[in-house]
Amino acid sequence: MKPVPLALGELPPFRVPLPFYLTAPWFGMLAGLSWIRDGELAFASRWLPGTLATTHLLTLGVMAMVMVGSLFQVLPVLGGTGVPRARTVGPLVFAALSAGALLLALGLDRSSPALMTAAVVLLAVAFGVFGILAAVSVLRRGRGAPALFTIRLALIALAATVGLGLWMGAGIASPDLGIAYRLSTDAHARLGLGGFALLLVMGVGYQVVPMFQVAPPFDARLVRVTGPVVLLGLALLAVTRSDAVAIPAASGIAASGIAYAIAGWRVMQRRRRRRPEPMVRAWQLAWVCLALALAGGWQWFVWPDLRLAGLPPHRLQMLYATLFVLGFALTVILGMLTKIVPFLSFTHLQRQCLRVRASPASLPTMEQIVSERAAWVQLAVHALALTTAISAVVWPGLGRSAGALLAVDFGVCARNVTVAALRHRRAARRILLAAASAR
Amino acid sequence: MSADRIVDVSDLPPPEPMRVALAALAELRPGERLILRHRREPFPLYPMLAELGFSHRTRPGAVTSYEIVIWRATEPPPEELR
């Protein structure tokens, strides 16, 4: 697959995605504090109020926050057409998503119908507005970059996840409605993680791994096949419980995801720059975790009663979910934030240079925005937090340590992104001064 | 015949090729042209070149996938490109 050139001229201003990036790590820190509070119960069952709250702090507050913020930048770049009215809609989506995610976590934690009602309304606004405009953006352009195909599928999965989530949220907020929301939780979680998160990271990876790591492109057939197989499998799992359908569907999803992980590893091994880089190691860690999580998910469909290493089935589910969320999705997100924030900062500063006719010599390097050392520290702390969280599924006594390390992990991320934003502002001011003094 | 300054950015991740190319252009002497060796076509560079007063022509490269020949717009294009 030949990556399509990025249409950087279509980028919305840096201030559109930046609030999403600056806020997401704070949700991660809250999730860490929640694990510290819950201690041994942090990984005991997915149904505990505290666990439901923490899960949504991580999936909505961190993952969806960064992904939606990034889509404001990615869609125009890959598709050639931006999200309409990004400058005005961006702040609205950001405010509704951050307030909605916080209220949902609080509502789930305290089992409060009032908080849940407010959260459902805010999240409906956030995803409704963003979803409609993102759909307009991807439909307006014909084919776009090949990676855009997988991202379109991710947006379909997002719509289904949000639809089910709002339905369930309404059921919890208004018990009188009699919505049997527990029946939809598996489909909601699978579409959110296996659909939106996996397909989006896949689609973005197909484009950015060859680009940032100076590696050969992914195989075009893999790009065409993996996304549809995953989405079809998830759709089948959402509508049937029959083993005759569920096992082949789960096998297709696991095979596609593992094939993507292996292909990614191979592409990375053939990169032209052989020096070790934090983002290379982050992708590799993420792919290993993805393969393990999907193999585990497949095992759960084929042998649902299996006990492994003394762990009962519900603990194994927690293990696979931890591998997916913390090991795969958040490893990529935390790694990409150390790469994409300085890249976007540089790109916007470069356009500013052009606009005000300043010398390009006044541009900072990416290293001056977020240093490679800072990216290594981020990866090391994240690997430690991940290892401790996985250990806490087996030994619940480690729950508080996992929470403390998760809080530090996202604290490092918050520091990196905040410092990058301040350095960007200073560099933008320097460029304006340089342009003024040159006149 | 114009002198060539050859810069190979094919092993650099973005946005380094752009930064290196702009730094090389700042040092380009009158009559000199820059040959940028690249693994992909640098679309974001083209509007910057025009804005900075340079002309360019992209051709398949012998060493890398693309070669972008860049010269001052006030000077005549290189002979082999006329």
Image (cartoon, rainbow, N blue to C red):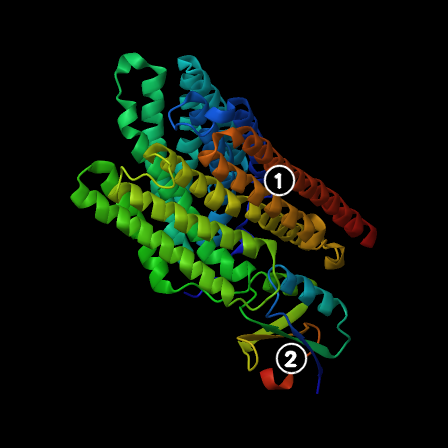
* Amino acid type assigned to the residue bearing label 1 in the image: Cys
Q: Which residue is mark 1?
A: A413
Q: Which percent across, then down, holds residue A379?
A: 59, 47
Residue A435 higher or lower than A326, as above or below: below
Residue at 42%, 52% (x, y): give it: A203
Drawn side of residue B24 relative to residue A386, left or right: right
Q: Which residue is mark 2?
A: B77
Quick one: SS at disc 1? helix
Chain containing mark 1: A
From where the camera sits, is residue A224 visible?
A: yes
Drawn side of residue A355 relative to residue A326, left or right: right
Residue at 44%, 57% (x, y): give it: A206
Drawn side of residue A373 relative to residue A288, left or right: right
Residue at 58%, 60% (x, y): give it: B44
From where the camera sits, is residue A80 visible?
A: no
Q: Nearer the viewer, mark 2 or mark 1?
A: 1
Chain containing mark 2: B
Q: Which percent across, then down, holds residue A44?
A: 42, 27
> How many angstroms separate mark 2 from mark 1 (CA)?
49 Å
In this view, the residue in front, A65 or A431, is A65
Residue at 69%, 65% (x, y): give it: B20
Q: Residue furthest front?
A: A310
Q: Residues within 10 Å of mark 1 (few under 14, many from 20)?
A: many
Q: Residues within 10 Å of mark 2 (few under 14, many from 20)?
A: some
Quick one: SS at disc 2? loop
Quarter occupied by residue B51: bottom right
In this view, the residue in front, A7 or B39, is B39
Q: Which percent across, then down, holds residue A246?
A: 22, 43
